[in-house]
Amino acid sequence: MHPNGLGSTGKGVSVTPQVLILGGTGEARQLAAHLVGRGVRVTSSLAGRVSRPQLPEGEVRVGGFGGIDGLADWLRREEVRAVVDATHPFARTMSEHAARATAATGTPVLALRRRPWQPVPGDDWRPVSSLEDAAALLPDLGDRILLTTGRQELAHFAALRDQHFVIRTVEPPEPPLPPHVTTLLSRGPFTTDGELELLREHRIDAVVTKNSGGTMTTAKLTAARELGLPVVMVQRPPVPEVPEVGTVEEAVERLGVTVTSPGTGGE
Ligand code: NAP
């Protein structure tokens, strides 16, 4: 990020630069709202995977850019002054493309990535580095599994024929799926009481999740701890080395815009 941010004097933004926010997260929406509220021209970009996305304030574009070159062209054409990569911590390809396209065009870039969850006493986490490794652990962890790793890449679990999976996603899960499945469609935030009820009702033996961070989906971790259930925790993929902040407030500050109210994490 440019040391002078977006041209702020410390009292607010004096110009109307275009900021591109690569979104798909609650933080991206909160950042868009913060910047739009301060007169910054913001375009949020969504991948277009969700049929009824929660739309951020400001301008919105939907769909891929066509790789690194496509994004670089877009940055030049739209005269983008700064890019904020606020994609989900597991959206590895988009983050890589953002790093390369901004390097190619000389556009300042900032990554907004919520900090990963950390285990606390009483947690029984089983860290793994991929969904494939998560699937390999499951035969030893019980018969009934709560899977909260998203609607894609469930093929890794498809060969597990002896276990029953409760798959919770925002949109219907993409096949191939394991043969024994209950699908629950819902979007957080979730409560600890609700998660305890879910784990008990479905007689869950183990939970599988990505280490997404944020506050919207931490209740399942608390509930698993209370019931003494193991949590298979998929660790984050490596990310490109670009300047990084962990909160919306820090991002606003780095962009050189005055902060007025805090935001919280979300999916
Ligand atoms: P990905 O694997 O990193 O990206 C694959 C391709 O999708 C990218 O090369 C790009 O296409 C397009 N794309 C991704 N994010 C985009 C965005 N914000 N705007 C425009 N194009 C985008 O991404 P993913 O893991 O499939 O995630 C897709 C979106 O869902 C992301 O925006 C992410 O924030 C959100 N999300 C992901 C997860 C997760 O667990 N992965 C969870 C919650 C939300 P081109 O190469 O054509 O530009």
Image: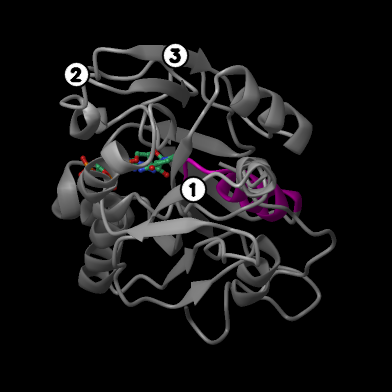
Q: Is disc 3 placed on a helix, strand or loop?
A: strand
Q: Amino acid at mark 3?
A: Thr
Residue 234 on the magenta span: no
Viewer can see residue 178: yes
Q: Give the foreground label among 3 and 1.
A: 1
In the rendering, which numbered label is found on residue 183?
A: 3
Of 152 and 11, which appears nearest the observer?
Answer: 152
Check if residue 29 falls in the magenta segment: yes
For the residue carrying disc 2, how many other residues have a C-alpha within 10 Å: few (<14), some (14-19), or many (20+)? some
The residue to which callout 1 is attached is 230
- Left or right side of 215 for 109: left
Give, as a single range, the part of the protein colored magenta.
23-37
Q: Secondary structure at mark 2?
A: loop
Q: CA distance from mark 3 to mark 2?
A: 13 Å
Against 99, is 4 above or below? below
Identify the mark at residue 176; answer none if there is no mark: 2
Q: In the rendered view, would you say 191 is above or below 185? A: below
Name the dominant secondary structure of the magenta segment. helix
Residue at 70% in and 46% down: 226
Q: Amino acid at mark 1?
A: Pro
Residue drawn 48% across the image and 34% down it = 205
Where does the image place residue 147, in percent across and percent down from the top left? 42, 32
For the rendered model, the colour scheme is one colour
Q: Is residue 7 visible?
A: no
